[in-house]
Image (cartoon, rainbow, N blue to C red):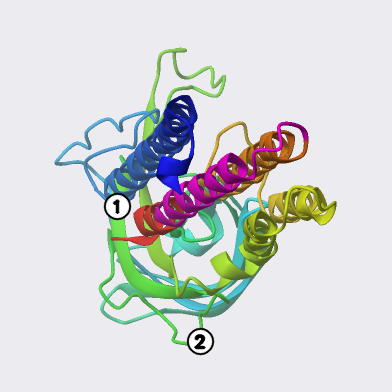
Amino acid sequence: MWNAILPEQRKFIKFWVGGIIAIYVAIIVVALIVIDSEKQQSKQNHALRMDPAKAEPGLTAPDPLPATGNFVIVHTGMYVENIETFSIRDLLWSANFYVWFRWQGSPDLNPAATMQLVDATIDKRDLVESYSGPDGTNYQRVRIAARMFKHFNTTRVPLDNHLMTIAMEDAVHDASQLRYVADTASNISSRAKIPGYDVTGFQTVVKGHTYKSSYGDPRFTNSTRKTFTKFVVGISIKRSSMGLYFKLLLGLFAGILLTFASFFVRPSEGSRFSFPTAAYFGAVANSYLTGQLLPPSGTFGLIDYVQGLGLFTISICLAASLYSGIIYNIRKDETFSKMLDRATRATILVVYVVANIALPFAAYGK
């Protein structure tokens, strides 16, 4: 059939196929660069967040702590009992956990009363146990219910992973008076689960936290900077499977399949154009529904690229059908119309499948 069409028609089909491939390749390359760079940046930020000597980009680097001084060492630990809520759209998650403090010296220090959470709200705080031993050891254990606020990186949702942190510091005593030391008994319960995610790691670190303000205290100058020790618990989570990915995009993929089916209908039939039209509106509705899972953002992520690629695919197929209809119904060239349909169908099918293998793999891969 290829030799049955005119040379200029063969040239047009080559140009048409080459243009389609070029556009898809450009979209795929841009999407892969964005997704992979965000994944690498996320790994770097997670490592810096749990590094006792470094700060994430954009955050104030802590001032170095003096090696000596009249400060009390407080051994601090945490046991995460459960995770109650987890909402990427609302930028928060909540948990119940135990915090304990152990120190030598005066029991009047009372770190359980002066502790505070960073970027979080304590909903309930109960002192479970408190005692002072004959050897001068003091111990306090507190049960806390809290909501933690987090700016989730949504670039790779729903094939994402996150480092959720609970950060705690003393609200009264800075590092010259009190310093936390991480207790190795810290842990997380096996009951702490998030639907759709696996808990892949748990770690603790103590790092400095410097505030660039004197808070208007007349005893200090405006340039005074106070540094506190911050006890941080990091909980690493990762999507347990690609099930949600396919569940969210099932409507889109069904619309794409319907669009490809239209190429098997003659251009003279009305259903040839009704298939991709219905698929387009279905894809738009699917895009709206998946968008409800994410917070408002001006950046493109995995879902946006896959949805955009689907809408573009339907549009290209519809344009090809319209032109094929002109060739078939007006120019009465059935051979050229069939050849254009075959070339368009085969080319778009291949590049679309490649794109929908490469994009989720880039997001979900290690």
Q: Residue 191 carries which label?
A: 2
In the rendering, which numbered label is found on residue 10?
none
Instruction: Give whichever of discs 2 and 1 has the lower sequence position.
Output: 1
Q: Identify whether 267 is placed above or below 162.
A: above
Q: Which amino acid does label 2 sit on?
A: Arg
Depth check, front residue: 10 or 275: 10
The stretch drawn in magenta includes residue 353: yes
Q: How many marks?
A: 2
Magenta span: predominant SS is helix
> Considering the image in quadrants, where does the C terminus appear?
bottom left
**Amino acid type of disc 1?**
Met
Above or below, 152 against 59 in this view is below
Q: Does the magenta stretch include residue 132?
A: no
Q: State the residue at coordinates (48%, 35%).
A: 20
Image position of 269 (left or right of 5): right
Q: Helix, strand, or loop for circle 2?
A: loop
Residue for badge 1: 50
Q: Which of 223 and 177 lies nearest the eye of the viewer? A: 223
Task: Tell me where the magenta segment starts and ends, as one range.
Answer: 330-354
For label 2, count other residues whose C-alpha is less than 10 Å away and answer few (under 14), some (14-19) or many (20+): few
Q: Where 174 falls versus 219 (above or below)?
A: below
